[in-house]
Amino acid sequence: MLIDPGVAAAFCLAALVMALVPGPDLLFIAATGLASGRRAGVLAALGMAAGLAVHTTAAAFGLGALLQAFPTAFNVIRILGAIYLVWLAISSFRAAGAPELLEPQQLERAYSPRRIFTRALLTNLANPKVIAFYLAFFPQFINPSQGHTTAQFFILGVLFIAVGLCVDATAGLLAGNLGDFARRRPAFQKWLHRLSGTIFAGLAVRLAADTR
């Protein structure tokens, strides 16, 4: 057995604690759910999970170490991610300032499943520190004496994604429920977009300023 059951349980518990702490991914999912509804919140969670799968693969094959060795590439990805989040913030504020509020059918077309999923995926991929986190956290639960360290890394990655997806999808549903309730009151729809835009802008500032 590549991963000891006790180690796997400890890893899942640690992953659950980290997933429950509000971070950039959870805030993005909540903002998306508030602005676009329950389905959008869950799709955002799936997009984040897909991004984590890419990060897992990259870290397992050493791309994270390569990024750490070349800080310029690391910073370029980080800045591009911040710019993308600023664009999302501007889009949300523009939606809040629209003269007419979107009806549910128009809202569904404006925020298509593919667009929501892609936004979440790109937002996750735009944060190269996720790979650095993987490299710092996962090795604590990998036992080189059991061999197949890359396979162990992938197993832990799957567990990490599964735990995170459960938490994120639940958050997306809850935020979507709140958003659906508020959207029945026209005055709230503008405020939901403004709140989403503020969250996206805050995430952009955090990503751009975080040079550690």
Image (tube, rainbow, N blue to C red):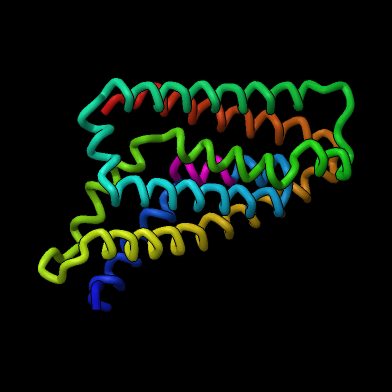
Q: Residue at x 29, y 20 (%)?
A: 72
Above-or-below relation of 133 to 73: below
Above-or-below relation of 201 to 161: above
Pick the front one: 142 or 20:
142
Would residue 16 be seen by someone viewing this image from the given angle? no
Q: Where is residue 11 in the image (x, y as percent from the top left)?
A: 29, 65
Quarter of image, res 105: top right
Q: Which residue lies furthest to the left in this view?
A: 145
Q: Which residue is drawn at 62% across and 28% down?
A: 88
- The rendered magenta stretch, by its main secondary structure, is classed as helix
Is 134 magenta? The answer is no
Above-or-below relation of 64 to 11: above
Q: Where is residue 42 in the image (x, y as percent from the top left)?
A: 63, 54
Q: Residue at x 58, y 45 (%)?
A: 29
Q: Which residue is drawn at 66% across and 42% down?
A: 116
Quarter of image, res 188: top right
- Give the magenta part as a residue range: 23-29
Horizontal side of residue 6 vs 144, given as left or right: right
Pick the front one: 66 or 158:
66
Horizontal side of residue 67 vs 49, given as left or right: left
Above-or-below relation of 117 to 164: above
Question: Where's the C terminus, which quadrant?
Answer: top left
Question: Where's the N terminus, which quadrant?
Answer: bottom left
Is 26 magenta? The answer is yes
Q: Where is residue 21 in the image (x, y as percent from the top left)?
A: 41, 50
Q: Where is residue 182 in the image (x, y as percent from the top left)?
A: 77, 45
Horizontal side of residue 139 vs 47, given as left or right: left
